[in-house]
């Protein structure tokens, strides 16, 4: 199977977690795009979705799925989203698509976070994938210097503005041995909006597209 076929298969496997769920939290990325396409079959059965990005919002609306404001709906039963890396503790790196802040908010506001990935995303230690950090634009250089002190090599994602009108630094060469600790340290740097480590609120269930199977972690 190609990587995209694995993404499609794992997206389909997530459908069993949304049975009888009226409002679904929806992430961002190519894996979630497959999930959104499947969600079209649930039109009429669900009230709508809370979306983590403008791109997912557009795709949901195009398929006739109402997009709801998180503030108006309260805690969500289920959030479905992809990831850039997953470790055996279900800690994640997210933000390759730049939507990390809204993704982290929806994950925090959801009872169950189902993460859908293909096997290429599974690692023992997070950090081979450059760690995205969303920053307030005027703080970019300051935050970059602080990230260098932590041993990383931040690279500015040039010509990219997040949905929240901020910028992204992608931090290379970090070996993230203590994800919760590093998440707290980076979140504490003034000017950081969100770091793409999801360890304080990890995934609850990880579905992995592996060969012809979907494995549940
Ligand atoms: C977006 C994300 C995505 O979940 C992550 O980048 C995975 O994307 P894809 O499903 O395209 O591999 O965190 O901000």
Image: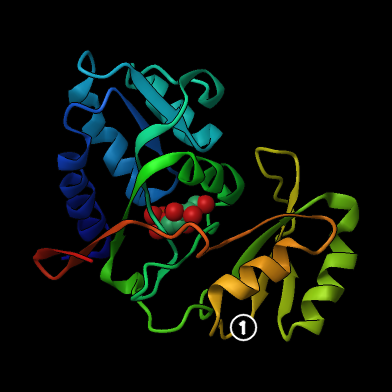
Q: Could you tell me which secondary element the residue under label 1 belongs to? A: loop
Give the residue drawn at x 20%, y 17%.
Answer: 45
- According to the image, what is the colour scheme of the structure? rainbow
Residues packed near mark 1 inside 10 Å, few (<14), some (14 to 19) or many (20 plus): some
Residue 79 pos. (x, y %):
37, 41
Horizontal side, residue 135 vs residue 95: left or right: right
Q: Is residue 43 above or below residue 146?
A: above
Q: Cβ(mark 1) to ligand 1 < 8 Å?
A: no
Give the residue drawn at x 53%, y 85%.
Answer: 177
Horizontal side, residue 172 vs residue 96: left or right: right
Residue 198 pos. (x, y %):
51, 61
Q: Is residue 53 above or below residue 214?
A: above
Residue 187 pos. (x, y %):
71, 61
Instruction: Read off the residue under disc 1.
Output: 174
In the rendered image, which quarter is residue 61 located in? top left
Q: Quadrant of the C terminus?
A: bottom left
Dividing the image into four quarters, tell me where ligand 1 lies.
bottom left
Which sits in the foreground, 100 or 118? 100
In the rendered image, which quarter is residue 20 located in? top left
For the view shown, which residue lies furthest in the top direction? 44
């Amino acid at each position: 199977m190609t990587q995209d076929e694995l993404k499609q298969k794992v997206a389909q496997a997530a459908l069993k977690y949304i049975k009888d769920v009226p409002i679904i939290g929806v992430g961002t990325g190519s894996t979630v795009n497959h999930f959104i396409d499947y969600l079209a079959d649930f039109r009429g059965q669900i009230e709508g979705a809370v979306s983590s990005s403008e791109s997912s919002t557009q795709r949901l609306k195009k398929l006739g799925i109402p997009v709801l404001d998180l503030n108006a709906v309260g805690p969500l039963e289920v959030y479905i989203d992809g990831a850039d890396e997953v470790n055996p503790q279900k800690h994640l790196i997210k933000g390759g698509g730049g939507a990390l802040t809204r993704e982290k908010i929806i994950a925090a506001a959801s009872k169950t976070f189902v993460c859908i990935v293909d096997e290429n995303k599974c690692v023992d230690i997070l950090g081979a994938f450059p760690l995205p950090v969303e920053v307030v634009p005027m703080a970019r250089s300051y935050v970059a210097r602080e990230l260098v002190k932590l041993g990383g090599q931040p690279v500015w994602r040039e010509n990219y503005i997040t949905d929240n009108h901020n910028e992204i630094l992608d931090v290379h060469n970090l070996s993230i041995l203590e994800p919760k600790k590093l998440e707290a340290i980076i979140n504490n740097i003034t000017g950081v909006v969100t770091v793409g480590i999801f360890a304080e609120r990890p995934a609850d269930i990880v579905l992995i597209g592996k060969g012809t199977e979907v494995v549940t972690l």
